[in-house]
Amino acid sequence: MARHGQTTTGLRLRPPRHGVAPRARRWWTAQAWLTVTGPLLLTVVALLVLSLLFFPGALPWLGPLLLGVLVLPAVAYVLAMPRLRCRIHAWEVGESAVYAAGGWLLHKHRIAPLSRVQTVDTVRGPLQRAFGLATVTVTTASTAGDVRITGVSDEDAERIAARIAEAARLTPREGDAA
């Protein structure tokens, strides 16, 4: 099995040249607050209030338990995840392929030949729009999945999509007459 950054032939991949937009870290932080950290902290508050109202004798052991099981992991997540994602996420569009690296816990490197590109989509969710960001998804004929370039500025997303679409249109397909 290939190790991180290596292909099955043993050659080492260099990281893609372009990183995410500087606003991506704030976007991922807001996302963490809305999806993980915020709900966990609301759960802690609700449990403490319920305990205070109905089971005050549980507070001496419930407080430290909630701190260790919910509060510390939630705070660690919101502090660590955006930094790690910004360090890992990168992209590059070359002459013959699009290359994206992503993930924060599981690192994923995807390279797709431009000759295999079927569609190029630009997605902007409500939170992404608030930060002026987008995700470019490149769909190929591969069953392995799409190539996703996440956390790029709106302007970069438009340029990337146009560049990939143009390169894919000009790239000769296998089986095409020469």
Image (cartoon, rainbow, N blue to C red):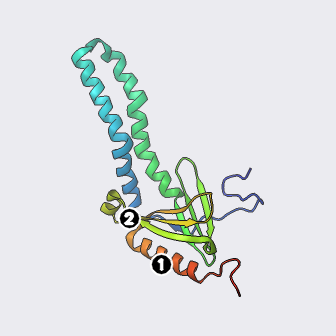
Question: Residue 45, percent across and down?
Answer: 28, 30
Which one is earlier in the sequence, the residue at label 1 or at label 2? 2
Question: Residue 68, percent across and down?
Answer: 42, 28
Question: Residue 100, percent across and down?
Answer: 56, 63
| Residue 109 versus residue 106 in the image, above or below | below
5 left or right, relative to 163: right
Q: Residue at x 57, y 48 (%)?
A: 106
Q: Residue at x 66, y 57 (%)?
A: 5
Q: Tell me if mark 1 has few (under 14), some (14-19) or many (20+) residues whose alpha carbon lies within 10 angstroms of its own.
A: few
Furthest residue toward bottom: 178
Instruction: Give the residue type at disc 2.
Output: Leu
106 or 121: which is nearer to us? Answer: 121
What is the number of the mark on residue 50? none
Which quarter shows the C terminus?
bottom right
Instruction: Give the residue type at disc 1.
Output: Ala
Label 1 element class: helix
| Residue 140 versus residue 168 in the image, above or below | above
Do residues under tags 1 and 2 come within 8 Å of each other at their CB atoms? no
Q: Residue at x 32, y 31 (%)?
A: 43
82 or 135: which is nearer to us? Answer: 135
74 left or right, relative to 15: left
Question: Residue 163, percent across and down?
Answer: 51, 78
The quadrant in which residue 114 appears is: bottom right
Furthest residue toward top: 57
What is the number of the mark on residue 133? 2
Estimate the spatial distance between the alpha carbons at disc 1 and disc 2, rounded to whole Å. 16 Å
Residue tagged 1: 162
